[in-house]
């Protein structure tokens, strides 16, 4: 191989189409005779439905159809359980999955009850106002603790409780650790809800072609292949009759891996029922009610340490708010439970959680997917222990990192991929030292003192995290040499802005030694590639990237074998470079890859028995276990104690996602993640009232951080190769947002030492920080 | 949401009481009221057009049930409203105190729950809007009372 593409910041192949407005998004799909759908959504968080009268809506001019749960007949059934509970002994799990349209009861504000199909979205929206629903309101469950009170209203009455799950995991003997400890710190930590706020909302368009007997669905999903498979099953079609396209998608962040959303089940059904193409595009307000959310947890956690700051054990009891349904299983709370352990040696761990149903929008993973909570609890406990011991926060971390000799390390608890929580590799201490050095930790105290004399309050926060990434089960890829000489790559993932068209092209270009721009990648089209699971858990590059690598290797072998035959040389003498095959030492005996591809697909003549046509190969990659990324975030903040405003002055991320494919793309991922993390730490919070009404369902009241609030992240890459895949890759999709809240809390406390502040909750806001400062002042 | 307040009418208590029971008067006084009719003893149905801040005005169908009437001193009410923007439900009490023969002091108290879009988008402004609507309505009623007394 003459060239190296893996590891280079090559410009992104997809940007030309994106930046010139030529990229197809679902809402761009316009088909002749297309009808438009609007959903009638519940205004109540918890209510019985006594009746739905759609007669006035049906009579409105321009309305083609109106459907309620009754009209769906046998098609009405609860959605699948997307992730079954992991095999943890003694686990309780009560399964309640979403339905296409609410029939007898609504469980959260925004749950769909009816849909109107009309000639335009305007008419459809107007017709929603014609529908009369007779509700009998019920008491709502909003607070996760109150959900388990004996007199709480019950959502899913078949269980007789709001308990969705109960899981206990751990290792070692915490009670003994506690007995031996010099210091035990115990606190309650709160983490509240936010929204993913992808730039593009969800959208589904569908067309049934009765002559081809084929259904085409355009969907903003992160998992086009499982959507195809599920639709085929539900609609009684062959998988080959259903074609799902997830074209360019403007941000996924997790909620778009949830399936099946009611709209995904219903739009294709309507298209088949009416024989006309149908489209629904979620509006921003709907997004607040109809797209899944994350993050409500309450932790009662305790850490036992020695006098010199070594962790002896951690105990954590927590409540996880799963919202109205638990269709995504236990991925989020299991991630919290596992990620809490961080990069540390924790000799004893007892972790017990209860997931509870509440009358709020369903919780499924949102970037970080429960990891934030675990990191927040652990990092805060370490900070509190360090403070009590008079130890520097960086020092207590240093003393507890797993050493390099520890890997592979088995935590003896079960992770979200159902295997033991197993760290494949890591190198933690140098990342911390790099972060400290980059942010100028040693000289910071001096600067802090100088600033204090000038009446200004600055503080520093430094925290660590690990991120389980790149889990199975598998992804696949097909690599084909096109007769034009360009290379086609198809994989089953969906793409939501991660740069797959470039990263996968780099992996293939390196193996085949062609220009990256000559590699054309297709993702998210089930006709192009029909096997796969989806884009989630920071696994795209690791799992699909490794499959691309394997397929490209297989094509390379085919190229060399064929070139040997055609050029009449032994394979070892064939050189593959710059899109050509040549005989070593005889450069005139050369063919372009395009010529070779044409010869591999002859129209006449005979080929050797067993020969496959073309230069093409398909390969799959399924890791036994994920690969463990890690990192350190450090930030400097300035706090104005009068106004409680916080300005982030500097933000440093030192992360280790194994070998980098494209540093520029990785930096983009981290920068974007940090922006979401900052939103989560100080701006974004979904506020529900006592009756389960969402009170800030618009960008007027739900605060997103702006470019002014998010500094340019200073980054350093460390590359500890993953042993579990051939390229040594680890995921990086969530690294930017996981430890941000913990770093923010530490930095704010550090800026105001005289307050003795303990920040035990996220998200904060200027208002909330102001009242915490008032309380601290009063004590 | 709780709405509390007081208002002083320049009229005898009996006159104020009568006005408050008269849908033809109330429909003129209540901001955005399009229709109000008595559909049973102490039961009213109406249509109001109300928006809040960024939320475009929509038609609300409203049902009010008066209870515990102690003429001319006090009554309670139960109210429900529905619109494409959401729903509202609440209870309220109204007490009339005769300050003197020509002055009546009204105390009002309401506990109102809102749901749907109106709660999600208008929340920040609801308190202010509710207070403003109450005040506008009462001022309009007072004008009606004064006009009636002047006749």
Image (spheres, rainbow, N blue to C red):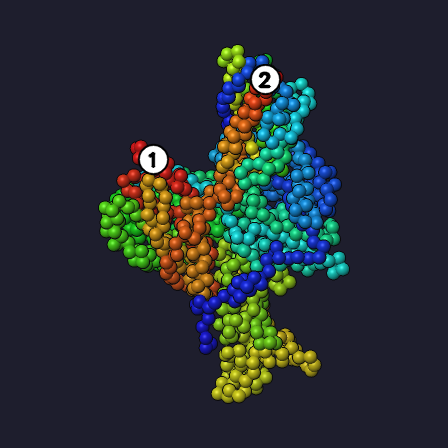
Residue for badge 2: B150
Q: Is residue A31 visible?
A: yes
Which quadrant is the C terminus of chain A positioned in? top left
Question: Which residue is nearer to you in this view: A51 or A592?
Answer: A51
Q: Judging from the image, what secondary structure is the residue with disc 1 in?
A: helix
Residue for badge 1: A774
Q: Is residue A566 above or below residue A636?
A: below
Query: On the same chain: label 1 and label 2?
Result: no
Question: Which residue is nearer to you in this view: B8 or A457?
Answer: B8
Q: Is residue A344 visible?
A: no
Q: Chain of mark 2?
A: B
The residue positioned 69% from the left and 23% from the top of the image is B39
Q: Chain of mark 1?
A: A
Q: Judging from the image, what secondary structure is the residue with disc 2 in?
A: helix
Where in the figure is residue A49, as x and y percent of width and height? 65, 34
The residue positioned 27% from the left and 52% from the top of the image is A444
Label 1, label 2: how far apart the Cα atoms are: 56 Å
Where in the figure is residue A681, as x and y percent of width and height? 41, 46
């Amino acid at each position: 191989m003459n060239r190296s593409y893996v590891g280079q910041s090559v410009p992104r192949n997809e940007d030309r189409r994106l930046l010139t407005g030529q990229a197809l998004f679902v809402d761009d799909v316009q088909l002749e005779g297309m009808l438009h759908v609007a959903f009638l959504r519940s205004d109540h968080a918890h209510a019985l439905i006594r009746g739905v009268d759609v007669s006035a809506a049906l009579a409105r001019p321009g309305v083609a159809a109106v459907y309620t749960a009754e009209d769906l007949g046998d098609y009405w059934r609860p959605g699948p359980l997307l992730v079954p509970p992991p095999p943890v002994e003694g686990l309780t799990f009560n399964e309640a999955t979403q339905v296409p349209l609410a029939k007898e009861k609504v469980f959260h504000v925004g749950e769909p009850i009816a849909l109107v199909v009309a000639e335009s979205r305007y008419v459809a929206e107007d017709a929603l106002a014609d529908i009369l629903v007779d509700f009998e309101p019920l008491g709502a469950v909003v607070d996760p603790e109150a959900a388990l009170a004996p007199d709480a209203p019950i959502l899913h009455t078949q269980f007789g409780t709001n308990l969705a799950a109960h899981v206990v995991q751990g290792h070692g003997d915490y009670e003994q650790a506690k007995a031996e400890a010099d210091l035990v710190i115990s606190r309650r930590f709160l983490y509240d809800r936010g929204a993913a706020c992808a730039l593009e909302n969800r959208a589904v368009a569908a067309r049934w072609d009765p002559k081809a007997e084929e259904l085409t669905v355009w969907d903003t999903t992160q998992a086009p292949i499982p959507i195809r498979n599920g639709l085929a099953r539900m609609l009684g079609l062959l998988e080959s009759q259903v074609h799902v396209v997830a074209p360019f998608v403007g941000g996924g962040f997790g909620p778009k891996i949830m399936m099946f959303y009611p709209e995904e089940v219903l739009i294709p059904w309507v298209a088949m029922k009416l024989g006309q193409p149908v489209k629904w595009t979620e509006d921003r307000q709907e997004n607040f009610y109809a797209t899944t959310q994350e993050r409500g947890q309450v932790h009662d956690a305790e850490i036992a340490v020695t006098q010199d700051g070594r962790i002896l054990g951690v105990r954590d009891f927590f409540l996880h708010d799963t919202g109205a349904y638990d269709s995504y299983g236990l991925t989020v709370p299991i991630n919290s439970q596992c990620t809490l352990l961080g990069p540390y040696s924790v000799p004893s761990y007892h972790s017990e959680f209860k997931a509870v149903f509440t009358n709020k929008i369903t919780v499924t993973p949102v970037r970080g997917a429960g990891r934030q909570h675990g990191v927040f609890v652990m990092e805060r406990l370490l900070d509190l222990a360090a403070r009590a011991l008079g130890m520097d926060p960086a020092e207590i971390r240093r003393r507890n990192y797993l050493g390099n000799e520890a890997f592979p390390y088995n935590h003896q608890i079960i992770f979200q991929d159902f295997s033991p929580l197993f760290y494949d590799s890591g190198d933690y201490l140098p990342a911390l030292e790099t972060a400290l050095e980059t942010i100028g930790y040693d000289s910071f105290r001096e600067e802090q003192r100088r600033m204090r004399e000038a009446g200004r309050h600055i503080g520093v926060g430094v925290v660590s995290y690990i991120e389980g990434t790149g889990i199975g089960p598998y992804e696949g890829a097909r690599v084909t040499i096109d007769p034009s000489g360009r290379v086609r790559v198809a994989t089953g993932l969906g793409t939501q802005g991660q740069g797959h068209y470039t990263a996968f092209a780099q992996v293939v270009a390196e193996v085949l030694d062609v220009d990256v721009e000559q590699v054309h990648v297709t993702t998210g089209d089930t006709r192009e590639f029909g096997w796969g699971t989806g884009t989630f858990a920071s696994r795209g590059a690791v799992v699909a990237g490794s499959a691309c690598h394997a397929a490209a290797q297989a094509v390379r072998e085919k190229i060399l074998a064929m070139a040997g035959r055609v050029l009449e040389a032994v394979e070892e003498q064939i050189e593959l470079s710059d899109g050509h095959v040549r005989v070593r030492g005889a450069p005139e005996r050369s063919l372009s890859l395009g010529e070779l591809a044409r010869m591999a697909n002859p129209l006449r003549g005979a080929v050797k028995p067993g020969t496959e046509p073309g230069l093409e190969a398909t390969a799959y990659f399924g890791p036994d276990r994920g690969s463990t990324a890690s990192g350190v975030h450090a930030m400097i903040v300035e706090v104005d104690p009068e106004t409680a405003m916080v300005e982030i002055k500097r933000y440093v991320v030192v992360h280790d996602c194994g070998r980098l494919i494209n540093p520029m793309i990785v930096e983009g991922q981290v920068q974007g993640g940090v922006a979401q993390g900052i939103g989560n730490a100080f701006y974004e919070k979904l506020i529900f009232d006592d009756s389960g009404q969402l009170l800030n369902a618009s960008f007027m009241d739900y605060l997103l951080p702006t470019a002014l609030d998010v500094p340019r992240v200073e980054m350093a890459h460390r590359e500890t190769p993953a042993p579990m895949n051939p390229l040594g890759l680890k995921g990086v999709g969530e690294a930017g947002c996981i430890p941000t809240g913990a770093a923010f809390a530490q930095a704010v406390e550090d800026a105001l030492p005289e307050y003795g502040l303990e920040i035990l909750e996220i998200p904060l806001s200027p208002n909330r920080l102001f009242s915490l400062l008032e309380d601290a002042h009063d004590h | 949401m709780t709405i509390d307040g007081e208002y002083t009418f320049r009229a005898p208590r009996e006159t104020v009481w009568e006005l408050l029971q008269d849908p033809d008067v109330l429909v003129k006084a209540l901001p955005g009221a399009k229709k109000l009719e008595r559909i049973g003893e102490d039961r009213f149905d109406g249509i109001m057009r109300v928006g809040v801040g960024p939320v475009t005005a929509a038609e609300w169908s409203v049902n009010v049930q008066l209870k515990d009437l102690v003429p001319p001193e006090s009554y309670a009410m139960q109210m429900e409203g529905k619109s494409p923007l959401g729903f509202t439900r609440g209870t309220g009490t109204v007490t009339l105190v005769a300050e003197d023969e020509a002055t009546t002091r009204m105390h009002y108290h309401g506990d109102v729950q809102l749901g749907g879009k109106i709660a999600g988008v208008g929340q920040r402004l609801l308190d202010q809007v509710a207070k403003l609507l109450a005040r506008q309505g009462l001022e309009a009623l007072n004008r009606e009372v004064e006009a009636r007394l002047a006749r």
